[in-house]
Amino acid sequence: MKYEIKKLEEREVVKAVELFNAIVDELHADSPVTERSHYKETYPVEEVKERLSNKDNVYLVGKLGKEIVSFMFAWASDGVGNIYWLGVKPKYRKKGYARKLMDETIKQFTKKSCHEARVFSYPKEKGAHKLFKSFGFEEKSFIDKQFFGISIILMERKLAPVPIKKIAKKMYSDPYQEVFSFMKEVRKIDCSDYYKLMFSVEGLIPKEDRKENLPIPER
């Protein structure tokens, strides 16, 4: 059977979310059930169905016949393509399916006039990390395990020259807020976590001001 990548349809949402939940359980196998639920709550079936009508979504599935073997949950926002979650069923890995899914996602970002793409990478998942790097993603920020329960790296890739108006906006943007907004689509968090995040993101903070030299605010 031929591997086909297509836009997620409403009738496929339940199976896609089931695969998403399985990927969360796999990546966070050592985390408590309550912690894993924070991730799963970002993509409830009914909300995913509602988001399908939004032109900014890049929700894709990879299929072999009628079986969904991979998925992509990504979103284009303000010129940035954000890859929040992707996964491939274990028995279908190392067949190039994830690469094809990534390739189609980047094409969708380009069609939506994105000048940049972002993704979170789990360092322990060396295969996925290597995949992102092969697509030109570079490590930008390290998020300590105390925040997510597992270390995560924010990676970025330039897709096109940044528009002048975006450059001016970025000069006055809050880097913590940018990462916080990205993370809200990955894991259920609230505003109180923003302050803790400020002490968890290496690479956005000068070395002399990093968390080992500063008290972590209580939640």
Image (tube, helix red, strand yellow):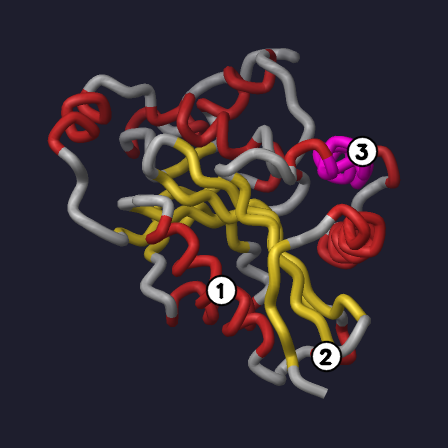
Q: Amino acid at mark 1?
A: Met
**Image marks 1 and 3: residues in contact by CB distance under 8 Å:** no
- For the C terminus, the image quarter is top right
Q: Amino acid at mark 2?
A: Tyr
Image quarter of residue 4: bottom right
Q: Secondary structure at mark 1?
A: helix
Q: Which residue is mark 1?
A: 102
What segment carries the magenta color? 35-49
Residue 20, given in percent of the width and then of the height, sits at 75, 52
- Left or right: 67 with respect to 96? right
Image quarter of residue 211: top left
Residue 150, given in percent of the width and then of the height, sits at 64, 46
Closest to the observer, 39 or 49: 49
Q: Residue at x 66, y 68 (%)?
A: 62
Q: Which residue is mark 3?
A: 46
How far is disc 1 from disc 2 in space, using C-alphas? Answer: 16 Å
Return the mark for residue 92. Answer: 2
Residue 55, given in percent of the width and then of the height, sits at 51, 37
